[in-house]
Amino acid sequence: MAHGPAPGIGRWLFTTNHKDIGTMYLWFSFAMFFVGGLFALVIRAELFEPGLQIVEPEFFNQMTTLHGLIMVFGAVMPAFVGLANWMLPLMIGAPDMALPRMNNWSFWILPFAFSMLIGTLFMPGGAPNFGWTFYAPLSTTYAPPSVTVFIFAVHIMGASSIMGAINIIATILNMRAPGMSMMKMPLFVWTWLITAFLLIAVMPVLAGVVTMMLMDIHFGTSFFNAAGGGDPVLFQHVFWFFGHPEVYIMILPAFGVISAIIPTFARKPLFGYSSMVYATASIAFLSFIVWAHHMFTVGMPLAGELIFMYATMLIAVPTGVKVFNWITTMWRGAMTFEAPMLFSIAFVILFTIGGFSGLMLAIAPADFQYHDTYFVVAHFHYVLVPGAIFSITAGVYYWLPKWCGKMYNETLAKTHFWIAFIGLNITFFPMHFSGLAGMPRRIPDYNPLWADWNMISSIGAFLFGAAQVLFLFIVIRTIFSGRPASDQVWESAEGLEWSVASPAPYHTFIKAPEI
Amino acid sequence: MPMADNKPDYYVPEQSKLPIFASLSLFLCVVGLANWLIELGEGKNGTSSNIFLLGLLMFVFVLWRWFEQVIEENKQGLNSEQLKRSYIWAMAWFIFSEFMFFTAFFGALFYVRTFSLDWLSTGPSSEMLWNNFEAQWPLMQTPDMALQGEQATVLGPEQNMANPGFQHWMSWLPFWNTVLLLSSSITVHMAHSALKRGKNGRLFNFWLALTVSLGLLFLVVQAEEYIHAYNDLGLTLSSGIYGATFFMLTGFHGAHVCLGTSMLLVQLMRNTGYWRWRLFAVAALFIAFYIAFNVNGFSLGYRLALVALAGLVLTVIAVVKTRQVFQKDDCFGFEASSWYWHFVDVVWLALFIFVYLLA
């Protein structure tokens, strides 16, 4: 085994090193975060005032679609896979991921897939314009030609995710250092194990549903066409059978990150470790039997509405266990509030708000009012932005010193936190009100009734965007001119990743460590 | 660093050019395919199909080199027991992902038959939208036909592939396909158990060649069934939801049989030597398939006989020109292929029950 990285661009193209691949995943997702963010700002700029000012409605629809797709598949998921690549082998004392070449393959599919997806903007008829959920028949009968490119981009993204997930499972099950029993694994490892299982279970279903679309569009099948005996609602069922576990794919690793950070800065071990493991597994199980709560208004039989309503509400139980455990971990802890901790505490509070609006949406009769309004937009942005994005940010501040051997600037990081925290609440909290007042999602123009809330949201969005530019600056500044970090980095951080030097050597744990 | 006492526990390969080319070829495949379909839809005749073919060839080549390299590493003793377990986990979870892919299509079939067709044929959707449409399964009359009669554009099939009743099974192709595929699962198991008893030469090759031949015969019957459906039954991909579910389920299964047969054939050829004989055996298969499906007027019997003959040639070559590359405790390539084969068999059983029998 070579001791250091290969020179030149070949290092990145041909690498089999989990740290290199993790770095590429993280930078890729950061880039996609800015692209998706830019699209969000186009949306918010248009919605700043009622009336059509900046973009055509057609282009507006392309922006909402691509914003969603890029944030879900390009920003959040690759960021967590990047964290997994960097941290899993370090946390379990493994020399690398189990299948290092396939790991490279999983990553390098993504730039190709996203050039296809973003490239659709320049195709005749424009980019996909049917929303990130691509409901048939909008995405079949009435779709622009670019839908075919979109379908194949999703296919190869799915292949990338499945291979990445297989690699993660093989790594966790087979590469743990002797003595690292399952119930000694850090929670980030546990949550990723369960997430990887979800990925392997549902990405093929996504492949199946886009294949049905492809066949309906090009080969005359009738899957989503009632005239031939099919059903457009079938699309929604298959899509959400993928889609609901998918939203947990975007949040379970976040739980792992938060469960690593809060004990460090509360200077207490995580409260209720095993209940955290079981809660994560329960959430994963429940995610398979709640999908139709996205479809309450589609015309399901009453029994279906009830079953999916109650099953959805059950999710609050294991999630409540988790929130309780995080708070109890902090209870009477010797807390300090460095940037990772600030983001983590904000995560616990704001994710819980998103969880509560989720409970409101879970009530089927009430959902008839909220469905497809900005209330839903507020809900899922509250679980994804302070949920997924904040936990990734917290993770980056927490582990960045280990990755590059340099300490970030705490003042700047705290500034980043407060701008982001205020910005996101200004953006998304008013959406609850515009939504409850009846504003539908995915519209470029709207009733002046909702003008004030929208103007506030738009101001917040630009503030939040500015905070992320500051984040980029902080990361680059840290890499180039941060002061050296110690190996331990954080006073009471525990785990194998802190036992190696900072920056982590190119190869670690070539011989398994003693646990 | 002295290597003797600091030998890595786990083989982490050096840099590799394989994956980036795998990504590139996958990209060429899907970009070519997407643009090809768009061109076809617009009635144009472009060059995208060439991009697809280029990508496909490149992909096959990269995979070939990749497997070659992994086999070479195993020969050099780089693969520890632990690394082999990684491969086992990876194959197991890959099969699980395939299982979930089929689940999506079986789920669609279940939903259509149990819920949506029922809703289409009752209440206001039947009375007000679809002219009192009533569904049966297999769906011969589509809602469009109920509504528009002669003007309908989405037509059902004229005849279907459903269970003709037990007394007709002897002339019912899906029954024979079930026989073929179930026996092939037994023969691949025989090959496996021969290997486990250390008989990694002729006996192993015999059972494996028999498995490959049965797989090929299955494909012949399946192709025959499709030709029959398109030519005689008016049953096509666009024959409403019955045609869609029928062809997508059996089609994806057939594609998996192709892949599984190829995997087993590769394992068989690895254990058959050397290139002259391998080439001869594979060429026999290709020629048999080519003649079987390109000579006008050939019936199923001739086609089966031709492919069976090629299978016999394959078996004879494999049994006579045996190598012994697999060991009873070192045969992952074969074992992975055989798990895949059993999986394909299980999917067929589900197909036989839900697509053919319960129709």
Image (cartoon, coloured by chain):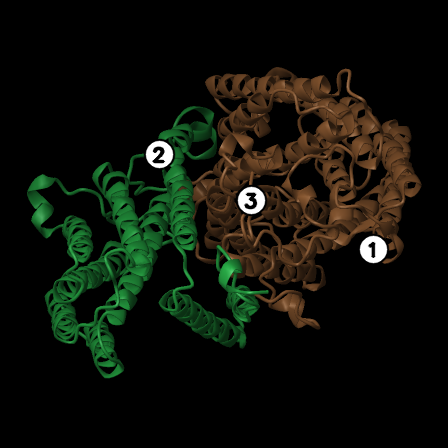
**Identity of the amino acid at label 1?**
Ile
In primary-sequence order, the first of circles 1 and 3 is 3
Classify mark 2: helix, strand or loop.
helix
Horizontal placement of A351 versus B227: left or right? right
Horizontal placement of B182 versus B115: left or right? left
Which residue does the numbered mark 2 point to in the structure image?
B113
Q: Chain B hue?
A: green
The letter of the brown chain is A
**Identity of the amino acid at label 2?**
Arg
**Identity of the amino acid at label 3?**
Pro
Which residue does the numbered mark 1 point to in the structure image?
A479
Label drawn at residue A205? none
What's the chain of the residue with tag 1? A
What's the chain of the residue with tag 2? B
Indicate the position of residue A312 as horizontal and vertical percent values. 56, 21
Residue lying at 43% horizontally and 35% vertically, measured from the top left:
B130
Q: Which of marks 1 and 2 is in front?
A: 1
Which residue does the numbered mark 3 point to in the structure image?
A137
Both on one chain, marks 1 and 2? no
Residue lying at 46% horizontally and 25% vertically, measured from the top left:
B124
Q: Nearer the viewer, mark 1 or mark 3?
A: 1
